[in-house]
Image: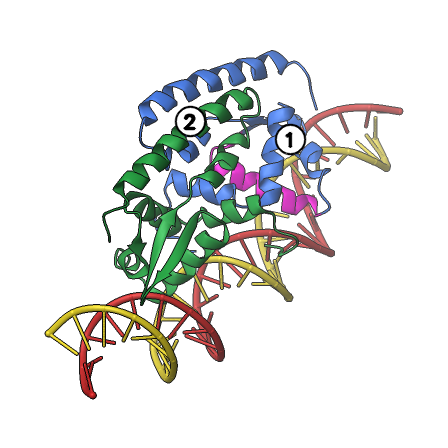
Chain colours: A green, B blue, C red, D yellow
Amino acid sequence: MSPAAQTPEDLVFQAIAHPARRQMMDLVKGTPGITVQGVASHFSFSRIAAMKHLARLETAGLITSEKEGRSRKLYFNPMPIQGIYDRWTSEDSSFWAGRMADMQQRVEQRAQARNKKNA
Amino acid sequence: MSPAAQTPEDLVFQAIAHPARRQMMDLVKGTPGITVQGVASHFSFSRIAAMKHLARLETAGLITSEKEGRSRKLYFNPMPIQGIYDRWTSEDSSFWAGRMADMQQRVEQRAQARNKKNA
DNA sequence: CTCATTGGTAACCAAAAGGTTACCTGTTGC
DNA sequence: GCAACAGGTAACCTTTTGGTTACCAATGAG
């Protein structure tokens, strides 16, 4: 695909195009603070491949990470998902955006509550 | 990407990864019954390239088409979008799925009402 | 302190993606 | 009836994607 001026939206949609990356997002969402190795261990491809996928998710803003010693902790970021939903549902989008923000808020609060557990 | 056993979800996510394809979906959604040529004329790349993109959207079930004389009419299909939303919002997903189905129903009804206009 | 673990970069390569032109058939408008 | 229009297929080519192995530095556990 043309590298011409990729928008944040482009990055998000491209990031989620790959099934492994979607599964990675599931893992990160389900286990906040999971490590790179923790994610990579779920896949049969190499750790380097996993890191490349994670890098794309992070570039797209779908996950965030923090280096902690020799590990890197990964966290899910739900905000870019709103753009996906809004894309073709512009009718009543203000209504749904509000609903979605509410629910995302709840998801985040739960994630914070779970944040004491490690990978 | 590996051609191994692509799920319908895979097809959808891959289809929407390309910005031109997203824009095409916008066009088809905004103008039900628009022709291939009608869509292609919005892009600087060749008609054949446009057709390839449209073919991917159709394979993914995101649009449908009907041959009419020498033209082909294109229609938006909102149902696969549900999968995109549900992907990472599995909490309360039964609640949102219901809401979303309602809204999609309304979108479709409006599309049918507009279906008398041509591209 | 030593070794194992974790993460990171670089180089490489096959396959896929996304474009191109050429050619053809069928339909429609004049 | 003819030319223009619309859609379709095939072949081709460049770029990107998604994997691989090799090597290294930093951290952590024993």
Quadrant in the picture for the N terminus of chain B: bottom left
Residue at 45% x, 23% y is: A99
Asked if marks 1 and 2 touch (Cβ < 8 Å), the reply is no
Q: What distance separates the C-alpha of mark 1 from that of mark 2? A: 30 Å
Location of residue A102 (image quadrant): top left
Mark 2 surroundings within 10 Å by alpha-carbon count, few (fewer than 14), some (14 through 19), many (20 or more)? few
Disc 2 marks a residue whose amino acid type is Asp
Instruction: Say if B46 sits above or below A92 in the image.
Output: below
Left or right of residue B1, residue B23 in this image: right
Position of A94 relative to B89 (above/below): above
- Residue C22 at x, y percent in the picture: 73, 55
Q: Is residue B72 magenta?
A: no
Could you tell me which secondary element the residue under label 2 belongs to?
helix
Q: Which residue is mark 2?
A: A102
Q: Position of residue A110 (x, y in %)?
A: 30, 36
In the image, residue A83 lies at what x, y percent?
52, 36
Q: Of the residues shown, which amino acid type is indicated by label 1? A: Leu
Q: Which residue position is annotated with label 1?
A: B27
Query: Observer-nearest residue: A97 or A47?
Result: A97
What segment carries the magenta color?
A: B45-63
Would residue A98 be seen by someone viewing this image from the given angle? yes
Left or right of A54? Residue B24 is: right
Q: Is residue B2 something that shows in the picture?
A: no
Is the C terminus of chain B in the top left, top right, bottom left or bottom right quadrant? top right
Mark 1 vs mark 2: in front: 2
- Of all chains, the one bearing label 1 is B
Query: Closer to the camera, D21 or A109?
Result: A109
Magenta span dominant secondary structure: helix
Q: Secondary structure at mark 1?
A: helix
Residue A34, given in percent of the width and then of the height, sits at 29, 53
